[in-house]
Amino acid sequence: MEREPAGTEEPGPPGRRRRREGRTRTVRSNLLPPPGAEDPAAGAAKGERRRRRGCAQHLADNRLKTTKYTLLSFLPKNLFEQFHRPANVYFVFIALLNFVPAVNAFQPGLALAPVLFILAITAFRDLWEDYSRHRSDHKINHLGCLVFSREEKKYVNRFWKEIHVGDFVRLRCNEIFPADILLLSSSDPDGLCHIETANLDGETNLKRRQVVRGFSELVSEFNPLTFTSVIECEKPNNDLSRFRGCIIHDNGKKAGLYKENLLLRGCTLRNTDAVVGIVIYAGHETKALLNNSGPRYKRSKLERQMNCDVLWCVLLLVCMSLFSAVGHGLWIWRYQEKKSLFYVPKSDGSSLSPVTAAVYSFLTMIIVLQVLIPISLYVSIEIVKACQVYFINQDMQLYDEETDSQLQCRALNITEDLGQIQYIFSDKTGTLTENKMVFRRCTVSGVEYSHDANEGLLRDAQWSTRLAGSISISFSGLLTGPCCFDSAPCLCLKF
């Protein structure tokens, strides 16, 4: 049964049609002349760059950008994030109080130096973390893929960032899709292809996608120059399990579009030689990037606990300073002829009023008693975090020989949370282990052939399984053999 796509126009009042059209997107081939051009040859003579520029005016390009800062926004935005830490606000307030001559207790520059050191270390760490994201974006944006060129009338290599909505892309086996692509052709005779969505949902099992109805029956190879249909689909959204639209051919016939026809960005083509499709969503309009909320300022459990402790220490400091200020004001009010311990006269030498003297005493006591919150503790923590990041990145025991890669610490301000796991929820034990089938031995015509290396690996795996049954977290009844992982029940471990 054919269903009605979300982007079709319904009969009714004009206002209803406008609301309906506002929820759809129209996609045309970039190889065709711009809509409204009277002479196709003249439209083609304007060149592909102008068509791309016209398309980019209302549709996003495929450039990836996950960084938080720019050269102009780094300093104010980073300071705004750092001042979400109560300790930084407190230390800056204390340092600024030392610049007031009537209440200062230390040298202003000496009081400001530790605060600037903490802010500088944190800012440099955030800058390096954002620069790492910039390098990762640059690497992804400069990945290559095959895009059909009108001038050369063949597929040419282009960077991912140069792809636009309406381009025809050709992907080969084991390549990653650079954008959300509508499948129009497949090397499979049945018009099918298989994709791996592990980058999106963590599932390694292959999913099947199908060529749009009407294109799988093509006898000859798909030619992008002959594609003149118009695609109407829903506006970009983050729903990975839903896609609705229709494709309108020149003869007026329509074919429905569903999620089985869409190849999402980040998925990998498997068990299929080649596929061809047209880009529907690109860049930050793809479903994968719309599900990415972007980088955020992360706070470790230790930092959150320290923020709470700082608030209690500030409350205690205010109470002590308030008690001292009230006592100082009462002393001035009752014994005006005697000079108090914290006597601060006016500029003309006359005595201050009890209320003014109490206010000055309150601010002075805050500076004197600021050691309740030691700034050296925060300086030490920032230095320790920097050293932890260095040693984690240089740890050779965390090096993977198969992929020739080492551990990368991308969140530099939560290193102390490494390994602090309280609960693990798993639908099966295969998520916690590595399910790998290895060849042990076989018999051909009565002759046994064995693989000694794999036999040794299997013995080690069986020894690890027996060892796991002897520790406090018992897997007995769950790990019954190397082929029983998928049948295990739901598992929750508490540490």
Image (spheres, rainbow, N blue to C red):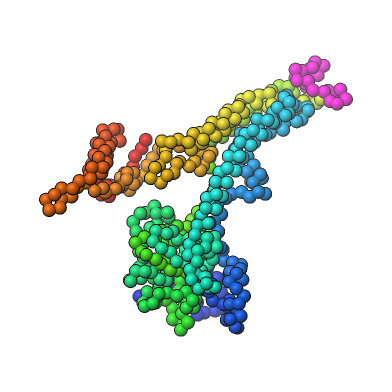
Q: Give residue 142's position: percent from left, percent from top.
A: 53, 56
Question: Where are the magenta residues, as a range?
Answer: 331-351
Which is more toward the observer, 359 or 375?
A: 375
Q: Main secondary structure of the magenta part?
A: loop
Which is more toward the observer, 377 or 434?
A: 434
Q: Residue at x 60, y 83 (%)?
A: 38
Q: Give residue 396's position: percent from left, percent from top.
A: 43, 36
Relative horizontal placement of residue 361, taking residue 275 as reference (left or right): right
Q: Give residue 246's position: percent from left, percent from top.
A: 45, 74
Relative horizontal placement of residue 327, taking residue 143 as reference (left or right): right
Image quadrant containing the N terminus: bottom left
Q: Give residue 369's position: percent from left, percent from top.
A: 66, 24
Image quadrant containing the C terminus: top left
Q: Above or below — where is 372 with respect to 164? A: above
Q: Is residue 58 magenta?
A: no
Q: Residue furthest top?
A: 338
Which is more toward the observer, 36 or 441?
A: 441
